[in-house]
Every structure is written in structure tokens, then in C-alpha cells.
Image (spheres, rainbow, N blue to C red):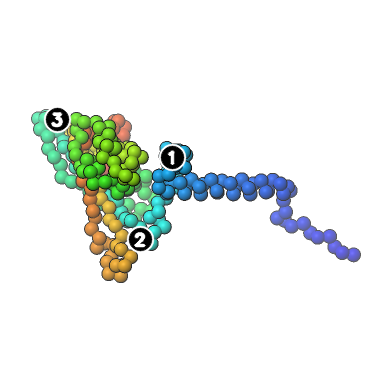
Amino acid sequence: MTDSPVPSRHSTTETRVARRAAAWLLALLALVHSFLILLWVAPVNPMRDAVGNARLTSYINPYFEQSWSVFAPTPRRISDSIRLRAVVEDPKTGKETRTEWVDVTTLVTRKIKYDITPARIEEATRRIGARINSNMFEFNDEQKLLVQGSYLTTSTDKLAEALLAAKGDGQGDANEINAYILYDDMLVRFATMYAQAAFDGKVTQIQYKVGYQAVPAYAQRNNVKVNDVRVTWWDFGWRKAKPGSSSAQKAFDSYVKGLQG
């Protein structure tokens, strides 16, 4: 007499239909995700325009952000840096003083050197710097010259219009311009609150520089070290200060004190 087979402890009561449906659903989600990633890293095209840049951005950032440089044998750059300075008004005399440049990225790097779980604020300068660097690589020479101007009494809306008017074929398109204006605003707000915490007086104007350090060419990999490559800086004009709320400024006061300590 043959013994009956012992049921496996891994057996399940789920039907094959349910399992197949779950497998097809996961496969579909993977395909949709891969398609959206492909659109994100692809150049501007009708299909991407149909989906919409805003929809893509809201899905990709901040968890799935990718760039073709991730897959390249020699990534375009390895670091993004920010320096800032300000014009500060003495509340008693009304006299304005221009501060020295502050390399915020270097201060942040020193602070988080051995910290495996840095706060999100510690990555702010790198992220904003990386965004602006990416925009600048897409701008033509005329557009790069425009952002070096000062916009103290003129709205950056006018800067956006000028950048669009200077657009060439395939360079500095509306998406890149809108992105730059957005990150310029973010960086001016960041710099204003940083300067307000770092210097005595009222901050009235802000100026920043954004730099990048490129990886040595693959052919020079045995002769040139990463640290030998100098940082290349983009210069930007003066911007009107954009102070934050009292609670935001209080948080920045603590943040800047931690960096300088």
C-alpha cells in the first residue's frame, strides 16, 4: 500500500487565479515604473510632454531620481558646492556692509563627516546646488550671462522672460528656465536665513556662487586624482533678501550655530 503524500508546510489555500493576478499586477507596476523612469531621463519629446513634466517630477522626486550620469563610466561631476555673501544693514546707523564669502558646503561637509544619519537640512545646499548646476549646463552663453546680473528691484519674472527670449535651439528651454527660477528662489531664501543667523544686522541683499567638481577623464584615471580637480564656479548677481518666518529663522539660528561650532 502506497503512503499518501504529506502536504508541504509551504502550501497555501490561495487559488492559482489569485496568485497569477497578483503576479500580473506586480509586473504591470514594474513596467509602469520603468516607463516613467525612462521618460524622466530621456530628452524632451512628445510623449514626455503628453505625460507632463509636473507629473513626472512629483513621481520621481525625491525617491526615484536618476540621471544618465549614474550609468556613465565617468560621471559628469562628483560634488556640488555653494558659497554665499550678504549685504547687512546696521539697525542703529542704517549703514550697509558687505560680508565675506561663506563656503556653506565646506562647513556642512566638516560637520557630517562621521555622521551616517545626517539631518535632511544638511543636504539642502548640495541638492539645490546640484539642481542649479544642471540648469546651467543646459543654458547657452547668453543665458549664463543673464543670470550674472543683479535683480534687486526687478522681479525674477523678468529674468525668466529674458532667459526665454535668449533661448536657442534645444538649449535652455522653458522647463529648464522655470526650474532655475524655482531653485534660485529656494537658494535666496536659504541664503537669507543663513546670513541672518550668521551676521549681525538686517540682511538686505544676497549673492551666491554654485560650483561643481568634475571627475577626471577616464583616460587620465591613473594620473589625475579626484582631489586634484579644481572646483569650477558659476557666478550669480545680487538678489533681494527673502526672509523666512520667525519660526523658520529660529531653526536656522540653531542650524548655523551648529555648523560654526
Q: To which quarter of the image does residue 132 belong? A: top left
Q: Say which of marks 2 and 3 sits in front.
A: 2
Q: Are marks 2 and 3 in contact (CB under 8 Å)?
A: no
Distance in Å between CA atoms under marks 2 and 1: 30 Å
Relative height, residue 23 to residue 167 (above, below) = below
Report the residue at 14% width, 33% height from top: 89
Q: To which quarter of the image does residue 99 belong? A: top left
Report the residue at 79% width, 59% height from top: 6
Where does the image place residue 169, in percent across and percent down from the top left? 32, 44
Q: To which quarter of the image does residue 200 belong? A: top left
Report the residue at 47% width, 42% height from top: 47
Residue 255 visible somewhere in the drawing = no
Numbered disc 2: secondary structure: loop
The numbered mark, 2 or 3, whose residue comes first in the sequence reads: 2
Where does the image place residue 24, in percent across and percent down from the top left? 63, 48
Q: Nearer the viewer, residue 46 or 72?
A: 46
Distance in Å between CA atoms under marks 2 and 3: 51 Å
**Looking at the picture, which amino acid does disc 3 mark?**
Pro
Q: Which residue is mark 3?
A: 91
Where does the image place residue 241, in percent across and percent down from the top left? 22, 34
Q: Which residue is mark 1?
A: 49
The numbered mark, 3 or 1, whose residue comes first in the sequence reads: 1
The numbered mark, 2 or 1, whose residue comes first in the sequence reads: 1
Residue 2 visible somewhere in the drawing = yes
**Looking at the picture, which amino acid does disc 2 mark?**
Thr
Task: Decide: few, some or many residues near mark 1? Use Cα within 10 Å; few <14, some 14-19, many ≥20.
Answer: few
Going by the image, does 247 lie left or right of 8?
Answer: left
Task: Decide: few, some or many residues near mark 3? Use Cα within 10 Å; few <14, some 14-19, many ≥20.
Answer: few
